[in-house]
Image (cartoon, rainbow, N blue to C red):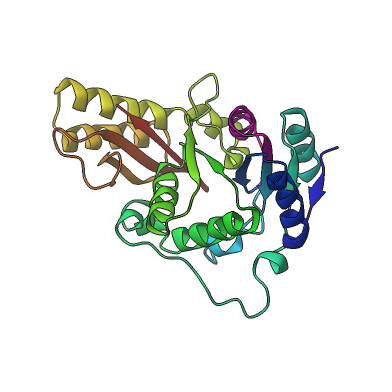
């Protein structure tokens, strides 16, 4: 079984001992319901650092009242087993009371990088993410932190926060792990019905087509986006929040010559899928 701690004091004590031994520390923040995409992060962390800490905390501050906090998948026993066999040295599983003590008032907000895309549809989200990630960084004081590229805007937000606050932490993005049919691995994929699961890979196909059209010059970006939206609706998606060609770093609307990243969020029934593709 993997060693597990639940308090800030215990986490800090173990990490302090590692630092006294000149061991480098990596952290992999998660919300649990782990899958092979998370394990890619853990294995990559083990290749870059002497010690790996994974955190599991379903963070309430990044969920709106109408979202799935109460039903978010939780598989703690399986999560511990996966971490143990993939080289994780310590599991940090704090309670809500540990992360947000009574009277907690402080949050971290960013501006431009969080405003578009997810910021339009989930305006509460990034303050919750930035706050909890900063708290994890201050609690563990890691040398490196690993995040998946599936949540591209989140990755860019965390990098911006680290730069702005002069944090001495290397933020490492790891390529999205996909199912055989191309669907990005996500804990929320468990919500999909069998019919919806069969439809789900169309989101990546839509993003692929937009990237191909832009890079080949075959269609103007807005024409390609509208065609991709029509395809998704025809394939059974119930709504599309956005399909957006962006500057890969700033997430401003893409212009010719910019590094390209196309981000998408769409609904299959009650399940919201996100994904992105670079050029």
As for residue 36 lying within the magenta part, the answer is yes
Where are the magenta residues, as a range?
32-52
Q: In which image quadrant can residue 32 be found?
A: top right
Q: Is residue 216 magenta?
A: no
Residue 77 appears anywhere in the view = yes
Can residue 63 be seen from the camera position used here? no
Frontmost residue, 260 versus 249 = 249
Image coords of residue 252 (percent x, y): 24, 48
Q: How many marks?
A: 0
Quarter of the figure with the N terminus: top right
Please state which of residues 155 and 160 is positioned toward the viewer in this rendering.
Answer: 160
Main secondary structure along the magenta-highlighted residues: helix
Horizontal and vertical percent for residue 214?
20, 27
User: Residue drawn at (56%, 59%), measured in percent from left and top?
Assistant: 132
Q: Which of the two residues, 225 or 11, is positioned nearer the viewer here?
A: 11
Does 1 sit above or below residue 61? above
Q: Is residue 58 left or right of residue 241?
A: right
* In this picture, residue 41 sits left or right of residue 214: right
Q: From this view, report whether residue 271 is shown above or below residue 36.
A: below
Q: Which residue is more in the foreground, 254 or 231?
A: 254
The structure residue drawn at horizontal position 47% and vertical position 36%, both measured from the top left corner, is 173
Relative side of 24 to 243, left or right: right
């Amino acid at each position: 079984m993997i060693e597990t701690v639940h308090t800030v004091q215990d986490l800090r004590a173990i990490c302090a001992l590692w630092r006294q031994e000149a061991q480098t520390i990596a952290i992999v923040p998660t919300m649990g319901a782990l899958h092979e995409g998370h394990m890619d992060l853990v294995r990559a962390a083990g290749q870059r650092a002497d010690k790996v800490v994974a955190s599991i905390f379903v963070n309430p501050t990044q969920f709106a009242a109408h979202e799935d906090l109460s039903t978010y998948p939780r598989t703690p026993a399986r999560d511990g087993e996966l971490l143990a066999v993939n080289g994780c040295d310590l599991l940090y599983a704090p309670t809500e009371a540990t992360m947000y003590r009574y009277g907690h008032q402080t949050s971290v907000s960013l501006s431009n990088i969080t405003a578009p895309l997810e910021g339009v549809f989930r305006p509460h989200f990034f303050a919750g993410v930035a706050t909890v990630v900063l708290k994890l960084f201050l609690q563990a004081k890691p040398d490196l932190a690993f995040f998946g590229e599936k949540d591209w805007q989140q990755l860019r937000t965390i990098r911006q926060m680290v730069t702005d606050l002069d944090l001495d932490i290397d933020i490492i993005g790891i390529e999205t792990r996909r199912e055989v049919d191309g669907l990005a691995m996500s804990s929320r994929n468990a919500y999909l019905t069998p019919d919806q699961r069969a439809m789900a890979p169309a989101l990546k196909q839509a993003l692929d087509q937009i990237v191909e059209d832009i890079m080949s010059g075959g269609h103007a970006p807005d024409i390609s986006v509208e065609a991709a939206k029509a395809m998704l609706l025809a394939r059974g998606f119930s709504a599309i929040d956005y399909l957006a060609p962006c500057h890969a770093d700033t997430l401003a609307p893409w212009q010719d010559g910019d590094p390209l990243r196309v981000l998408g969020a769409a609904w299959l029934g009650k399940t919201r899928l996100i994904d992105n593709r670079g050029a």
